[in-house]
Every structure is written in structure tokens, then in C-alpha cells.
Image: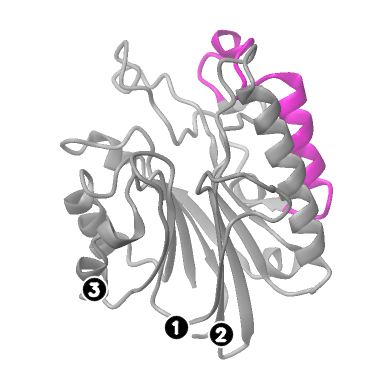
């Protein structure tokens, strides 16, 4: 089973790229972020024609998450628990059944948090605390769990081409990285780092200042796995070449292969 995550930065602007990548990579489940549209505006028919079931938690103009799955959904839940009054569409959770039991997949678009001196940074940390609590709850089920998406977190200096440039940024502040480690310390595994410690692996390049051309990137899109999912991890990858396509997102897809029989 191939599970992937991709911040598409507007599904309607990147529809052709998304369809081309799906045809090329053939993932079984994909979590999309920043779809930037309401549920009824999501181009579900295009994905259904490729054999995907579609679950959407959209929002007008910004944010918004969705899941595409070749397997039928047993459950679909929208919204991260614990945020009374939080109207931002940043979380969706699905359950699918395989020949070897269920798999639970959460798609997240974690808040950016900048500018740090505004209310946006406390919201980021509060959201991360809610995510930690939710993951702890789900880990009690002792089932394969994948929590993937745009975390807006640079975990370690080696996850940035120029770490010093991010020193005061919400993505790399010590509090942010500590909150991310707290989630890992629940028993979750960073899928990519479980398979490689190679440098220069990035999933985001800014549109400005020739970042892509100079490979001045950062790794902020992650798949975190429960122990039951980690036991089945076979391979991971970052589809860097997609950033070079016409009208690209500033993020590229990241994926992991788990040993499941559909």
C-alpha cells in the first residue's frame, strides 16, 4: 500500500499536475493539503475517473484538506478534536479496510505560525498540542496509523539547506521542534528518516529568490507512523522532479510504501 501526502497549493490550479502525478506514482491513498476550495468546488469527478474515492474538508479561498483512496472509506471524520470555535479546515481522518485489517490515515495541514509575534504562533502550538492528544488517543487502538501532511515543521538542521536562514521562523523555532519531538515520543516514527539519513532531502522550495534552482529547500511534509505501521514500512520517497513541472506547487509529494494486501 502506497500512502502519500502533497500540499498542492490550490487543487483547481494544479489539477493537471495532480492527475499526471497520480498516473505516474499510482498511490493507493493520498492526503492533499491547501486545496483552497469548498467541498462542492472540489473536482472529485476527475479523481473518481481514476478509480479514487474522495473525502473533502474544504474551506473557501485557503486551507482545506482532502483524501483520495482506491479503497472504500469505512469512516470519514473532519476537524481536529479539542478546538472549540476553530473553523479552519486543517484535519481529516479516514479508515479503510485491507485484507489484513484496518488502516487509519489522518491528513493534516498544520498552521504555519508566522509572524511569530502575532496570535498565529500560539495557535500553531495549541494546534500541535491538540494533535498530540489526538494521536495519543488513536495509538490506544493499537492499529496501523499514518498521520501525514504539511506539518510546517523543520525537524532538524539537516532538513534545511540553510538552517541559519530559518532561525527565527515559526517552522524552526525551538518550541516548534520540541512540540514535534513530543509527538514522535508518543511512539510515532518519521517514515523518511526511518529509511535514510541522507542530507539534501527537501519537500518545499519557495517561489522566490531562485530557491528551486539553487536547491534551497526545506523538509516540512512528513508521514508519521504508529508502531504497527512502522513494522510494515518498506520504502519512502520524495518526488522532487514534480517541482520542475509547469505551474508547480511549492511543495512536492512525499510517499511511503507499507506491506499490506488490499
Q: Quadrant location of residue 241?
A: top left
Query: In the rendered structure, are the residues bearing label 3 and label 1 in contact, judged by CB atoms less than 8 Å apart?
Result: no
Q: Element type at marker 3?
A: loop
**212 to the left or right of 198:** left
Q: Is 164 in the magenta?
A: yes
Q: Is 81 in the magenta?
A: no
Query: In the rendered structure, are the residues bearing label 2 and label 3 in contact, judged by CB atoms less than 8 Å apart?
Result: no
- Residue 126: where, in percent of width, then height? 73, 36
Q: Element type at marker 2?
A: strand
Q: Which residue is drawn at 80% across and 52% down?
A: 133
Q: In this view, does 138 lie above or below 59?
A: below
Q: Pick whichever, 66 or 237, lies toward us.
A: 66
Q: Mark 2 points at which residue?
A: 97
Q: Is residue 262 above or below residue 19?
A: below
Comparing marks 3 and 1, which lies closer to the viewer? 1
Q: Earlier in the sequence, mark 3 or mark 1?
A: 3
Q: Earlier in the sequence, mark 2 or mark 1?
A: 1
- Residue 131: where, in percent of width, then height? 71, 49
Q: Name the residue under label 3.
A: 50
- Between marks 2 and 3, how big is the CA–CA gap? 20 Å
Q: Which residue is drawn at 57% across and 14% down?
A: 166
Start and end of the magenta stretch?
160-188
Q: Mark 1 points at which residue?
A: 72
Q: Looking at this rendering, what residue extends furthest in the front direction?
A: 85
Q: Which of marks 2 and 3 is nearer the N terminus?
A: 3
Q: Element type at marker 1?
A: loop
Q: Which disc is residue 94 wearing?
A: none
Q: Is residue 229 above or below residue 84?
A: below
Structural crowding at the residue carrying mark 2, measured as other residues with C-alpha within 10 Å and reported as few (<14), some (14–19) or many (≥20): some
Amino acid at each position: 500500500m502506497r500512502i502519500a501526502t502533497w500540499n498542492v497549493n490550490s487543487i483547481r490550479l494544479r489539477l493537471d499536475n495532480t492527475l499526471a502525478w497520480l498516473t505516474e506514482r499510482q498511490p493507493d491513498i493520498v492526503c492533499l493539503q491547501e486545496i483552497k476550495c469548498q467541498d462542492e468546488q472540489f473536482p472529485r469527478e476527475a479523481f473518481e475517473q481514476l478509480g479514487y474515492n474522495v473525502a473533502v474538508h474544504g474551506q473557501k479561498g485557503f486551507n482545506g484538506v482532502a483524501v483520495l483512496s482506491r479503497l472504500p472509506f469505512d469512516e470519514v471524520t473532519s476537524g481536529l478534536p479539542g478546538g472549540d470555535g476553530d473553523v479552519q479546515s486543517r484535519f481529516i481522518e479516514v479508515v479503510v479496510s485491507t485484507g489484513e485489517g484496518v488502516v487509519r490515515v489522518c491528513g493534516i495541514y498544520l498552521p504555519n505560525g508566522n509572524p511569530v509575534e502575532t496570535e498565529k504562533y500560539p495557535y500553531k502550538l495549541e494546534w500541535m498540542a491538540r494533535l498530540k492528544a489526538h494521536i495519543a488517543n488513536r495509538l490506544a487502538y493499537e492499529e496501523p496509523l499514518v498521520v501525514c501532511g504539511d506539518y510546517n515543521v523543520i525537524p532538524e538542521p539537516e532538513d534545511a539547506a540553510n538552517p541559519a536562514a530559518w532561525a527565527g521562523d515559526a517552522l524552526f523555532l525551538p518550541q516548534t521542534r520540541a512540540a514535534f519531538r513530543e509527538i514522535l515520543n508518543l511512539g510515532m516514527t518519521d517514515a523518511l528518516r526511518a529509511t535514510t539519513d541522507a542530507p539534501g532531502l527537501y519537500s518545499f522550495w519557495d517561489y522566490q529568490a531562485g530557491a528551486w534552482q539553487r536547491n534551497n529547500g526545506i523538509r516540512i511534509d512528513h508521514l508519521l507512523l504508529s508502531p504497527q505501521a512502522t513494522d510494515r514500512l518498506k520504502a519512502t520517497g520524495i518526488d522532487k522532479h514534480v517541482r520542475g513541472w509547469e505551474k508547480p506547487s511549492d511543495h512536492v509529494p512525499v510517499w511511503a510504501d507499507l506491506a499490506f494486501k488490499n
